[in-house]
Amino acid sequence: MVQNQPQPSLEEIAVRAKTASIQAKDSSLNSTEQQQAFLEKQIALTELMDVLMKRIKNEFPKPSGVDASTYIYEESLQDVLLYICKNIDKYDPERGSVMGWVVFHLKNRKKRVIDWLNWKGNVTSIYKDGHDSEKNILDFYCPLEVRIPLPSEEMIDFIKEDPERLLASTLFKNNPKASFQTILLKRYEEDKSWKEIVQELELGATHGPVSTFYRRCCEKFAPYFKKYIYQ
């Protein structure tokens, strides 16, 4: 009896699409090989988009009603999917999950659409945290209390590089697994809720102390961020 093969993960599908995309750009291929490589790229991207859209539908459902929230959602999502199709060869599984990559760019695109509309008010959030509480779509700061713009790739790289090792050496309750750097990356690169962070790092039953630690660190290291990001 033939057993059903396990379905590949989203990350595995993305890596396959990345490999196909890189192969399709190989100038050493002859005409027939290029056509075959391009076909394999299209098949891989189609599979990736199909699985990705199912995940997005479940995790970031479209806002109900017809208003600015819906427009921003649709414009931002369309832009992100187009970006991923064009730049799948840039996906790095070692830097995070596919959904983390999507969320990162989705936040950027939402901010751009809001700026383009010159939108001043609040807009219905398109996703919820671990406690089913809605996030404000205008919460585009990393970290928020530092008042520096939305976490760009430059910002994420800075947090990881941590040139003076201040973020990595600041620990929650002296726990080496729970540095401020780790918490920042889980919060903003991986878009984890406080509940998920507490569970993953095994920090206790509630997230109150961790979020308090986070806020204190944001205030403490605001000059550090500004020193390197906005010299």
Image (cartoon, helix red, strand yellow):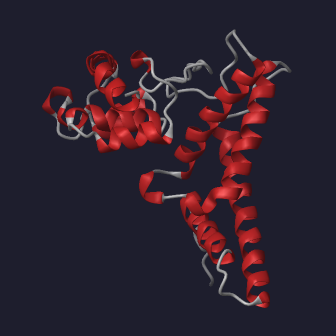
Q: Position of residue 202 (x, y in %)?
A: 27, 36
Is residue 64 shown left or right of residue 156?
right
Where residue 114 sits, quadrant-wise, is top right
Please tell me which residue is depicted at 74% across the width and 16% down the height of the picture: 118
Query: Looking at this view, is 42 or 205 the one in front?
Result: 42
Residue 8 in view in this figure: no
Q: Is residue 40 visible?
A: yes
Q: Nearer the viewer, residue 147 or 172?
A: 147
Q: Is residue 218 left or right of residue 91?
A: left
User: Measuring 55% from the left and 24% from the top, which residue is drawn there?
Assistant: 140
Most extreme residue toward the right, as rendered?
Answer: 66
Residue 28, image x, y percentages: 65, 87
Position of 102 relative to 38 (above/below): above
Q: How many marks?
A: 0
User: Residue 222: x, y in percent?
Assistant: 32, 20
Which image quadrant: the C terminus? top left
In this rendering, is residue 120 above or below 135? above
Nearer to me, 143 or 157: 157
| Residue located farthest toward the top when viewing the structure as drawn | 121
Q: Residue furthest left?
A: 174
Residue 218, placed above or below residue 52: above
Residue occupying image coordinates x 63% and y 83%: 2
Q: Quadrant of the N terminus?
A: bottom right
**In-front residue for pair 177/160:** 160
92 horizontally vs 225: left or right: right
The percent coordinates of residue 131 (x first, y second) are 50, 23
Residue at 73 percent of width and 28 percent of height: 113
| Image vertical order of residue 85 relative to residue 219, above or below | below
